[in-house]
Image (spheres, grey):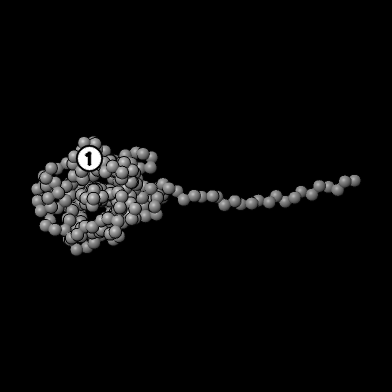
Amino acid sequence: MAAPAVEKPEVQVELEPITAQPSHVVLADQAPVPIGCPPGLEYLTQIDQLLVKQKVELLEVFSDIETKNKYVIKNSMGQQVYYAYEDSSFCTRLCCGKRRGFRMVVVDNDKKEVIRVKRKFKCCGGIACCANLGCAAHEVKVQAPPGTTIGYARQQCTCWKPHYSVRDADHETVFDVKGPCCIWSGACYRCDTDFKVYSPDGHTVVGKVSRQHAGFIKEAFSDATNMSVTFPMDLDVKMKATMLGLAFLIDFMYFEDQHQDSD
């Protein structure tokens, strides 16, 4: 008589899931969304810094022909949050250079436009000592969603140091921004250039917009910049988006033609 078969116990093996570091950020489901937050800006409630990295355009490197600016916007961990690209005409870029008017379109990782930054061309713009006059002050208007103005970043009257104001939709000043007396950039200048953000009283530093050294090769052969925008964690997302618009304005005014200027 054959011996009865003995059942072998079933062995269960738990496999750890394989996860990869995402290149695009995922919004946490548990994060509360404040009332009145423009669609697409929910993630800004969770961060206190944005890294803005301009892409190098090969045509611009080899020909000095000004192309449309493009930026990858990341969080402090290097994950892409948004992508921005300039909308302007070839003649405007060729004739007006860094003074040109433009529309900066900021899209999320689903390629949906969430922020629009608009700057008008001003033939007399950039005269710092006359910036109290509307025709002489560089300014960007920030909209989120497109068509709804949420703030402005505007050049202020000054005799020496760069001075800006960050304003809400009613043109009320929320922050003052002051830059260094001398602004240097280039392959051999390895220090960051900080534009400090002050509370309206002008004494308390609450954030900054910094132009960061991008590396010797990138600095030597292009005008593509790396910038960071730092702000309080609990700041209204509308003002965070406006400070991003300020970073674009500062980039155009001081660092857009640095390679051509050095030549």
Q: Identify the residue at image location x=26%, y=42%.
A: 66
Front residue of 129/24: it is 129
Q: Neighbour class for label 1 at 10 Å: few (<14), some, many (≥20)? A: some
Residue 165 in sight: yes
Viewer can see residue 168 = no
Residue depicted at 83% across the width and 47% down the height: 4
Give the residue furthest to the bottom: 203
Whether residue 211 sits left or right of residue 202 in the image: it is right
Residue 177 in the image, given as x and y percentages of width and height: 20, 56
Q: Is residue 223 left or right of residue 171?
A: right
Q: Quadrant of residue 144?
A: top left
Vertical arrangement, residue 174 with respect to residue 96, above or below: below
At 18% from the left and 44% from the top, the residue drawn is 99
Q: How many marks?
A: 1
Q: Residue at x 55, y 50 (%)?
A: 17
- Residue 107 in percent (x, y) is at 33, 41
Find residue 97 and report its image quarter.
top left
Q: Taking 18 as reference, is 227 left or right?
A: left
Q: Is residue 178 above or below residue 68?
A: below
User: Please, is residue 40 above or below residue 229 in the view?
Assistant: above
In the displayed orientation, state which residue is furthest to the right.
1
Residue identified by numbered label 1: 93
Q: Position of residue 219 (x, y in %)?
A: 30, 53
Front residue of 214 and 149: 214
Q: Secondary structure at mark 1?
A: helix
- Which amino acid, by three-letter code, is at mark 1? Arg
Percent position of residue 190, x then y: 30, 60
**Front residue of this view, candidates 83 and 259:** 259
